[in-house]
Image (tube, rainbow, N blue to C red):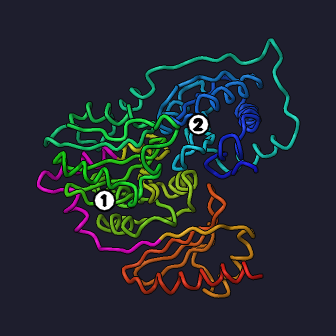
Amino acid sequence: MKPIISGSGIRGIFGASLTIADVVQFASAFGILVGRGPVVVGRDTRRSGPAVEAAVTAGLMSVGCDPVLLSVVPTPTVQIEAMEEGIRGGIAITSSHNPGEWNALKLIGADGVFLRSAGRKHLMELLDRDMEHADYRTVGMPGELSGSVERHIEGILSIPWLVPEGRSLKAVLDVGGGAAASFAPMLMERLGIDFAVINPEMTPEGDFPRMAEPTLESLNELSRAVIDENADLGFAFDPDGDRLALVDENGRIIGEDYTVALAIDFILSVRPGPAVVNLSTSRLAEDAAAKHGCRLYRSPVGEVNVVEEMEKRGAITGGEGNGGVIDRAFHSGRDSGVAMACAISFLRENPDSSIGRWVDSYPSYTMFKKKLPLGTGFDPLRYRLLEEYGPADDTRDGLWYYRDGGWMHIRPSGTEPVVRFIAENRDNSYIEKDFLIFREAMESLCVE
């Protein structure tokens, strides 16, 4: 088994498709890519984290880099520290939404952005050739850095659109046993929010206390807690703290797409301009931008792709429908802290409103997601689907089709060996028809 390599880094099942030897090799190649000097390293709470951290440290030092260990911090915290003067880059040790047996390296440039295409290409070239290692005089030396979470929060508190004071609010934080366990409560305290925390730790066996991904299916406990606590809203995080899902004041599980739409709606109300989301993000984002007379653009899936489209369009605000909000004026990465700040600021700016009333002011869409094993590679499926559906409206990332009232997106996953079918529409019959064609195309390939 081999690790999966994508725009967000390298990931696999620890001890199987991602071994210590793999980690050392990739960390060494990354060290050569960014050059000798300090490289910040943070991790999430996975049981394999310390072992992977040790391997990353060894790999970086072996090529003359000086790893600077941040310990357990959210991925956006690593991105922010990577932008500090003199830092060559960063590595976040996390497999994001994957279960506890997975781990990964997210590779970050000195601009705080996941490796761009040229960097990814160069990294692959380095992996295919013998690497030159440091000798005893030039080997790197490890160090530690404290206070990075506090600096991250200070950055959020300095965002111009933030509403730091106002109505009294209470939130429930479902940190999912992940890296937001210290970060999220600290931010709530600084914003003067009353809060309760659920699922604070990993299980002794090394599993997350709920499904790692904060989806509609995994947040029933948070929903009950919001009701029991009489809270104004609930926040749910993924293991590395870059994504956020919402629950409203009635315990209704809103989901991740509403997080990005809320951020776009609020930020554009005080700072109009273009916004960018990826191809698999709900039309709610378009509705939010249109509400303020602003244009919304789409990019291929993946944080780095969204960031590069934002740069191209001159957009400050954007994100991905998985709950990843980006405010490029702060830093160019998905940040659950920024998303929390948007929700709190919206409620304080609109003291007579609520998350639920805001949601009800938007059209109701049905979104359908399905993933199926992809054993043949995507090209045979692509050709078959083009025959069935006709020319796609966007081919930058699989096949994306506009539909009256919605859209459909079929793409190979960058994080799992599957193909994803995602469709959204106000009329469910469009989705049913499109998925039937997709399923029959998949079945025909299996027969062949």
Q: Which mark is residue 131?
A: none
Magenta span of residues: 340-368
Tally of numbered tags: 2
Question: Is 28 on the left or on the right of 404, as rendered?
Answer: right
Residue at 29% across, 55% down: 247
Quadrant, the C terminus: bottom right
Query: Is residue 88 positioned above or below 410 on the image?
Result: above
How far across and how far down the image is residue 261, in percent?
35, 60
Q: Nearer the viewer, residue 401 or 370?
A: 370
How far across and how far down the image is residue 257, in percent?
39, 61
How far across and how far down the image is residue 225, in percent?
25, 48
Per the image, is 448 magenta? no
Label 1 belongs to which residue? 253
Residue at 26% across, 60% down: 252
How far across and how far down the image is residue 61, in percent?
72, 22
Which quarter of the figure has residue 275? Answer: bottom left
Q: For the residue labelled by badge 2, is the local secondary structure a helix, a strand or a loop?
A: strand
Can residue 81 be seen here? The reply is yes
Q: Nearer the viewer, residue 25 or 346?
A: 25
Q: Residue furthest front?
A: 205
Q: Amino acid at mark 1?
A: Ile
Camera-side mark, 1 or 2: 1
Label 2 belongs to which residue? 93
